[in-house]
Image (cartoon, rainbow, N blue to C red):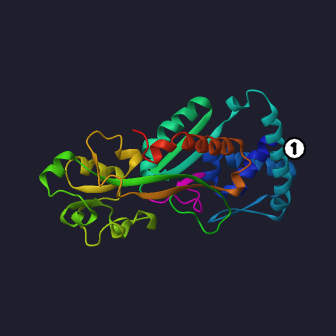
Amino acid sequence: MDWDHLRFFLELARAGRLVIAARRLAVDHTTVSRRIQALEKSLGRALFLREPDGYKLTEAGRELLPQAEAMESAYVAIASAMPNREEKLSGQVRIGATEGYGTLLLAPQLAQLGMRYPHLKIDLLALPRAVQLSRNEADIVVTLERPERGPFIITRLTNYVLRLYATPEYLAQHRPITKKEDLLEHHFVSYVDDLLFSKELFFLDGLAKNTLVNWRSTSVLAQQEAVAAGAGIAILPAFAAQKDPRLVQVLAGEVEFTRTFWMLMPTELKDIARMRSTWKFLREQAEKLQDQLLGKAN
């Protein structure tokens, strides 16, 4: 039996859709269809039901699945024992992340990953919203909330801190801030409340009630630019704002929020070499950036 055909069978069985399986394999969807047809012809049995909402395994497909997975495990074990195996990684991996972490930290990290594995195709979804594993939007996701249930591998990737920032010019032109209560007299830049994608982004109520929010955006990077232009004060990730020469910290040592980034991957992808290597790489990179994430380094 052709192992190459079985790779396509496994990806389609896991994804349920041709376009998603094709993305993960870095081929055209017609190639996936052709491979599946060739496998079905060689076995003399239909392996999938083509339904409006995707591809479902037939009884024959369900019987083949554990055998194909066993072959995959054996292949991974052999590949892992081979020298220079890292250079052999290929296919596509799609990573979803929050906008700030994805843009400022993951983008350069993934550039390094691409140079390490030149045959690996990388997609980065750095968005001001939650990327859904359940909808197959990504293969690995960095998110603010740990799911309570689901067929996922989950790890605490890293903690990070957020602090108050403004420009020196704004602070010079407005009343001095020496304690939290003084914040009530200042303008704030924040999120659009009804479009928040995570409860972990609710900050202002825990800082000072009835704060005056004059400028809002779904984008934390847009918020930072607005603050840098003098729009007011904002709660920003230290890993982003601390390196911005236009900004200074407000109430240093008194106001700080800590949040956690979680990393998730569907259990069904854990034995795929490119997914496993990317997962390990992202954990290593987060560990290296601890001082920056916790606001201890510029």
Left or right of 48, for residue 206? left
Percent of width and height locating residue 124 = 50, 45
- For the N terminus, give its image quadrant: top right
Percent of width and height locating residue 43 = 86, 51
Q: Nearer the viewer, residue 255 or 47?
A: 255
Question: Which residue in the rendered view is the most extreme toward the left?
Answer: 173
Residue 104 in the image: above or below residue 202:
above
Percent of width and height locating residue 16 = 67, 59
Residue 206 in the image: above or below residue 79:
below
- Would residue 29 be seen by someone viewing this image from the given angle? no
| Residue at screen point 58% across, 38% down | 121
Dominant SS of magenta comes to loop
* 27 drawn magenta: no
Left or right of 75, for residue 144? left
Q: Residue 51 sits in which quadrant? A: bottom right
| Residue matched to label 1 | 1
Q: Nearer the viewer, residue 150 or 20?
A: 150
| Residue at screen point 57% across, 35% down | 113
Amino acid on which the number 1 mark rests in the picture: Met
Question: Which residue in the rendered view is the most extreme toward the top?
Answer: 84
| Residue at screen point 54% across, 60% down | 132
Q: Which residues are magenta?
A: 129-142
